[in-house]
Image (cartoon, helix red, strand yellow):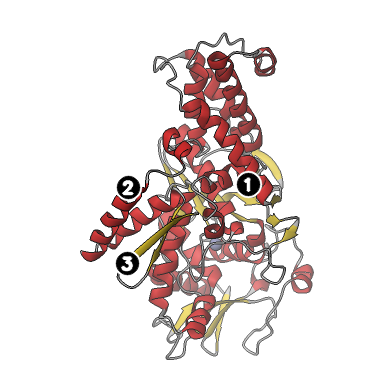
Amino acid sequence: MTPELQFHNSATRRREAFVPLDASNIRLYVCGPTVYDLAHLGNARPAVVFDVLARLLRRIYPHVTYVRNITDVEDKINARARETGEPIASITARTTADYHADMAALNCLPPDVEPRATESIPEMIAIIERLVAGGHAYAEAGHVLFSVSSYPEYGRLSGRSPDDLLAGARIEVAPYKRDPGDFVLWKPSDAETPGWESPWGRGRPGWHIECSAMSWKHLGEEFDLHGGGHDLLFPHHENEVAQSCCAFPGSRFARTWLHNGMLLVNGEKMSKSLGNFLTVRDILTNGPWAGEAFRLFLLRTHYRANVDFSMERLEEARAELDDYYALLVRDLPKPEPDDAVVADMVAWVLEPLADDLNTPLAVARLRDLRAIENVLQVGGSMTAVLERAGRGWKPKPGQAGAALREAAEVLGLLSSDPQVWRKGGGDDAEIEAAIAARLAARARKDWAEADRIRADLLSRGVVLEDGKGTTTWRRG
Ligand SMILES: [Zn+2]
């Protein structure tokens, strides 16, 4: 059974039935990280939200292409290299590996395609050439700028009028701009700054053009879904639309736009000056439980709402996971693979996800399945839960437990080994063996395997610290 998917589309500000452009290949683009520092908690939210979306789409459609980019050319990276003296290639490689390890610890599956901006420079130049030829961009003093006044639809996605745009945004006034709202597509690079040859001299792209180029390269001129944090709606996404729709007249770029709300910490916007700035790595060092608990914490709030992080809420999520794993660690009877009650229980949990990714309701239903199985295992009453579900189930032992596992997988939850969860990340001997295997991989320069082992240990709450010739580890 295919549930009808509905999403709140930021572009129309309405909830709409999802109609794929091509049901044999659902195409999803999500703005990925700029790799110059560790991911903070706010960066983790879109990764988790759109991981759930991709998992749901994969369950319904035969093929999904989920593209999430790596921005590895951007002025923040250049600035970091100047401050620290670390080569750019080293900063981006290290930070990309950290990002992969952190997202794996949050149980986010890798996207199907993870393009690097530096590998898509020819596509960026091609789009900019189209924009110049179409009168939507102009070259001035080594820069190429998008002419906002050339595109009457500008501001439609974010719902801002051209006047608001100028008043609200931090607009850089520069002599090479014809209009203060015009934004940079290409800029000149000096000898110390990364640059590529182009029709406008040696230079580098602006940030916005990177996503237009990578989505075009991997998903085509028009695709189904575009996700990102609400903070990217303006100007980043507005600019992506302007670039892509003007370069490819007649195309609509992304059909449906999904924006996740912001993450607050203890009720306030996260900031270094307030002292409430937290990286994903900070959270993971709390213990092997922390990655999955943080994921559950996020999914307990609807993706469009702001979510308020606190250690208490993380601990609440951990306690909920402890309850699930305490049930799953039991030797539950295995129902038949085509058991109709199990299938209906799974469908009941997933139904709210089809309704604009209502993860809080799906999580509440997971809790109900746990309650049913728990009654069957240890006694008690399940009348209230069965009434709430209203599906006429007469559950037999094992059915709700099996459904719990299957439905949780779509949310990216409960995939840890219950024994390992209860032991807190595995035996010391097992961890030491994994570290030895990683050192051996490093010795033969198999960096991918070394990173994989490090990510696997991190997902179990084991943090490695490489010193001179030795590696030490700690649990959280
Ligand atoms: Zn983007």
Visible residue check, residue 419: yes
Q: Earlier in the sequence, mark 1 or mark 2?
A: 1
Closest to the observer, 153 or 282: 282
- Neighbour class for label 3 at 10 Å: few (<14), some, many (≥20)? few
Question: Which residue bears the numbered disc 3?
Answer: 470
Residue 353 found in image quarter? top right
Q: Amino acid at mark 2?
A: Ala
Front residue of 286/186: it is 286
Return the x and y of residue 128 as percentages of the image width and height.
49, 73
Task: Assign a secondary structure to mark 3.
Answer: loop
**Residue under label 1:** 314
Which numbered disc, 3 or 1, marks the residue closer to the eye?
A: 3
SS of the residue at dot 2? helix
Query: Mark 3 belongs to which amino acid?
Result: Thr
Residue at 70%, 56% in the rendered image? 264
State the residue at coordinates (66%, 70%). Answer: 272
Q: Which residue is mark 2?
A: 429
Q: Residue at x 64, y 84 (%)?
A: 177
Res. 247 mark: none
Q: Nearer the viewer, mark 1 or mark 2?
A: 2
Q: In 3D space, how far apart are the residues under numbered discs 1 and 2 (Cα atoms)?
A: 29 Å
Secondary structure category for the residue under label 1: helix
